[in-house]
Amino acid sequence: MSRLTTLRQLVAHFLRRGRFFLLPLLLVLLLAGALLLLTGGLSYVAPFVYTLF
Amino acid sequence: MPAVLGVSAHYHDAAAALVIDGKLVAAQQEERLSRVKNDPSLPMNAIEACLTLGEIRSTDLDRVVFYENPYRKLERVMVSALRGFPRGTAFFRRALRSQLGDKLWVLDDLAAHLGVPRKRMHFVDHHESHAASALFCAPFGDVPHSSIAALTVDGVGEEETTAIWRLEDGRPRRLASIAYPHSLGLFYAAVTAYCGFRVNEGEFKVMGLAAFGEPRYRDAFDHFLQVEGGAFTLDRAAFADHLDGARAFGRPFVEALGEPRTPAQKWNYRGQRIQGEDARFADVARSAQDALEDALLTLAEHARALTGATHLVLAGGVALNSCANARLLREGPFERVFVQPAAGDAGGALGAALLGAQDEGDALALGEPFCADLGVPIRPATAAAIADALGLRTTAVVDPNETLAARIAGGDVIALARGRCEFGPRALGHRSLLARADDEALRDRINARIKKREPFRPFAPAMLESTAPALLRDAPNDMTPYMTTVCRVRDRSPLQGTTHVDGTARAQTVQSGPLAPLLRCMESHGLHSVLNTSLNGPGEPLAATEADAIDVLIRHKPDGLLIDDLLIERPNR
Amino acid sequence: MSVQPNAGDAEEVSLRARLADVFYTWSWRLPGRRWRRLFAFAAAEAESALELRYAAARTESPERAALYLRHAEDEARHARILLHWARQARGQSLPDLPRAHAQLFRHLGENVFLAFVHRGERRGRRQFEAHVRFFSKRDPRLAAALRSILADEVQHERYTGELAEHECRKQARRFDVLHRYRRAGAALTYPLFAGLMALLYVLASPLSLLLGRAPRGWQAARRSTGGD
């Protein structure tokens, strides 16, 4: 629910600034962001783990 | 009892600050606790430390204030990437990854980690945080608000890179601003990268290097950084921050100045001179530093004209350029100039917390001298137990200041940890390495063996404010207690180990605090100052806890570590 | 499985070790692999050093703080050794080591942290045994350097094994699996994300015509945009 607040504020910001034409781009970007979050795509630290390849 | 937490994070040097009842009770940089230099990650360790120091739980927080507007930031990133088409493909990918991965969600993440309702999460503008950190912490209690202007100058906030402020009804009000991509912070970052240093970290090194050079490349820099109408613009073709933040300079730099320096190469430095090919980089640094200082002077004059103020406070990463600050005070249009020690992004947490406290209805105590010892304390008993477990020698000394003074006078390098850790990049005596200030050989030894850093980098002296006039040509001022400026050293002052090649020193003048009793003891040994550098090794953050301080002792081998009255030494010394 | 500091020279090796030998014999020979892998090892060691210094500052036990500090010192030394060999293998300077760590001590708690470190050290020791075997004839100096690291790994494996509570090992294993999933997720997702972003950038580029130029010089003040 908390993230919905952020989304609402984000869209409100772009509308307030009159940058309507950036909203479709923003939508696609947010979908890509969801992909990153779901797959742990931001985790790249690896202590105590030596790479195999 | 309103409790407000300020947070800066996700760019560089994350930090937290806690204000309770309008009073700043704690401020802590994340790097000191995570042990990652300039750690940008969400500062949960620093937040925990602040809450512990304030003796409250996270659920007691009435307001949490983030130091910038995440939505404006995302907008600026999108807009500048699109403006840079088609060259910004890699930038677009990288920037959007971090924006969408964590930066956009920072308020949600904070709420979740703290267990605080999302509606208590707020944000303020980046430069407003900086302005508040400077205006609310300035020691100008006797001065009407209308006489104080603030100039905030950094790489980039949301869109602004530079802004002029003044206090209206006790709140910072922005009068004018310069927008990205025209940025003095990014200008200096490009020079930093060109000289082979890490951006957002090596800027101090460029400033130190400049003292060895001649401004031979000034014409080129006047082209890269054009000053007119009280403002400045960058020749964007010369800069690559929108393509590669780590490289930051473009092809015109190479055409005008030659090939950039390979990082981490040994410096050709002998007899206080930078020689050979490296002399070119000293000249580049000198030219860039002059260009930066001239631009800052122009901005200061514009701020004066706009506000009519007589007093100036500065904040933002560029305000950490102590040489520029000295020139602003000496040649600029203001009677007094103040820069608080955490002028960079860490200080944004401080400003955000103070603004949040105002929004909670707190009256802030303005005009008091700023105390930088806002971080975690150090406990001798814990240190003794760790030292014992490591087989180190521990001694309880009867008169710690006299012991320390005698050891320093005898030529030892001693680590000193007392009380709460400093906030900001400078060690002010709470987590310091100390030595004689009059010994050039000792300076070289500390550079080579303990700090393992570039041989040309200077060290700073600390001295009692009462003795400063005998040692320095410049009088102590509002910045000297925090080492945010430099002073010209008198001829034949016994500061040989701490005077830079241009005859200046980043002197710390001391009236109270942990170094005051030590400096008084040193007088009896015929010494009027002490070399004071940060308690850390190369590429490491300042030591904060007992374990960190002992880690410096065992790995970097100063001659001893004094924590309150506990002296710790290596057994085979 | 017995722990032999000089296991690289041992005559009898297990089936697991034989499989590792086959794998590494192939993989060390891939072009550019040697410096990249040595560099990645150095990065893992440097990160581990940060984790351990962090743990030393947070543990309640001075004895453990001392052990973690010594361990961190070893890891930092290993990183220096491996960087040296990576540089040699590449014949030119290397990128900066990444500077971050996962703050495992905070996320896992001390006991699970120890169990996780124990797992990592055991896995590292087995891998290094295979690397030492691979290089002992082909590059004896590198083998000797790796062997010196191996000796420390054996000691780290032992002390963390002694301290790690048995019941925490399951949790450490679970975290290890999750950790690997996230690493694999990052490796697989990022190229996809990068491709998507490149495409999006091109598709969105006409929008730049609507944006106009960035402003220059002083702009008049706007209202602050703070909010909640």
Image: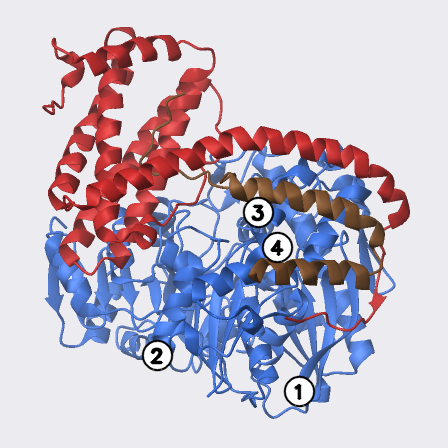
Q: Chain of mark 1?
A: B
Q: Are marks 4 and 1 in contact (CB under 8 Å)?
A: no
Q: Are marks 4 and 3 in contact (CB under 8 Å)?
A: no
Marked residue chain, label 4: B
Q: Residue C115, relative to residue B149: is it above or below?
A: above
Instruction: Give the SS element for disc 2.
Output: loop
| Chain of the residue where label 2 is placed in the rendered structure | B
Badge 4 amino acid? Leu
Which residue in the protein does label 2 denote?
B55
Label 1, label 3: how far apart the Cα atoms are: 37 Å
Q: Residues within 10 Å of mark 2 (few under 14, many from 20)?
A: few
Asked if marks 2 and 3 touch (Cβ < 8 Å), the reply is: no
Label located before the other in sequence (4 or 1)? 4
Say which chain is brown.
Answer: A
Residue located beneath label 3 in the image: B101
Of pointers 2 and 1, the one earlier in the residue sequence: 2
Badge 4 and badge 1 both on one subunit: yes
Q: Which residue is mark 4?
A: B104
Q: Residue at x 11, y 66 (%)?
A: B395
Q: Relative to C99, is B185 above or below? A: below
Q: Which residue is mark 1?
A: B170
Mark 1 falls on what kind of element?
loop
Amino acid type indicated by mark 1:
Gly
Name the spot of residue C21 as percent of width and height, x first. 27, 11
Question: Residue B110: x percent and y percent?
Answer: 50, 63
